[in-house]
Amino acid sequence: MKTIFSIIKLTAVTLILFAVIYPLAIYGIAQLSPNQGKGETLSVNGKVVGYQKIGQKFDKSNYFWGRPSAVDYNAAGSAGSNKGPSNAEYLALVQKRIDTFLVVHPYLKKAEIPADMVTASGSGLDPNISPQGALVQVKRVAKERNLAEVKVKALVESKINSAVIGPETVNVLELNVALDKLR
């Protein structure tokens, strides 16, 4: 009987500690952070249009496309596909992405498609693409928007983020928001 009461007390203390005190402490710390722990949002005219650190689906031809997502851009289910380069199903999926990319970008050859445009990231939510991934889309986006390619290319180049460590990247959401402002 004494053991049962000890177990019940331990359960109650643990429940209060991990289900009440810990979440309240994390919430309090989040309130001290930028944007009160709601993430880095991007707003246009006071309306939140997306999160800068989470990839979003852009599939219209007048926008730059991001990396494919193994979880269809569902931030609640962040995950990769767990299929390796020798998996036949994975290879078929990548080939399908290549074929689709070439249909919409007929001016490209297969070897000119950057890998990040046809392969998903480990999280399935990468908000960035390589500068090459953005640059190969310039012709399509410029044509769809009736803009000069040189103007769209200059926009892409202005949105390239250099890192101290790691490759240069382009945030797709930021690029597309800037594209909507371009005249």
Image (tube, helix red, strand yellow):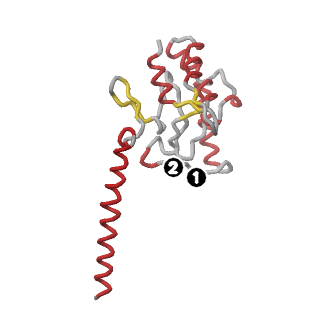
Q: Quadrant of the rendered structure where residue 162 is?
A: top right
Identified at 59% across, 18% down, the residue is 153
Q: Nearer the viewer, residue 97 or 170?
A: 170
Residue sitting at the far right: 111
Q: Amino acid at mark 1?
A: Asn
Mark 1 touching mark 2, by CB under 8 A?
yes
Classify 12 as above or below 123: below
Mark 2 lies on a secondary structure that is loop
Lateral position of residue 178 relative to residue 115, left or right? left
Mark 1 lies on a secondary structure that is loop
Q: State which quarter of the image contains the N terminus.
A: bottom left
Q: How many marks?
A: 2
Q: Nearer the viewer, residue 26 or 114?
A: 26
Lateral position of residue 12 relative to residue 153, left or right? left
**Separation of residues labelled 1 and 2 (CA atoms):** 8 Å
Residue sitting at the far front: 32
Identified at 56% across, 21% down, the residue is 158
Q: Position of residue 165 (x, y in %)?
A: 63, 39
Identified at 31% across, 71% down, the residue is 13
Q: Nearer the viewer, residue 167 or 165?
A: 165
Q: Position of residue 170 (x, y in %)?
A: 56, 30
Residue at numbered disc 2: 79
Identified at 39% across, 42% down, the residue is 33
Circle 1: is it few (<14), some (14-19), or many (20+) Cα within 10 Å? few
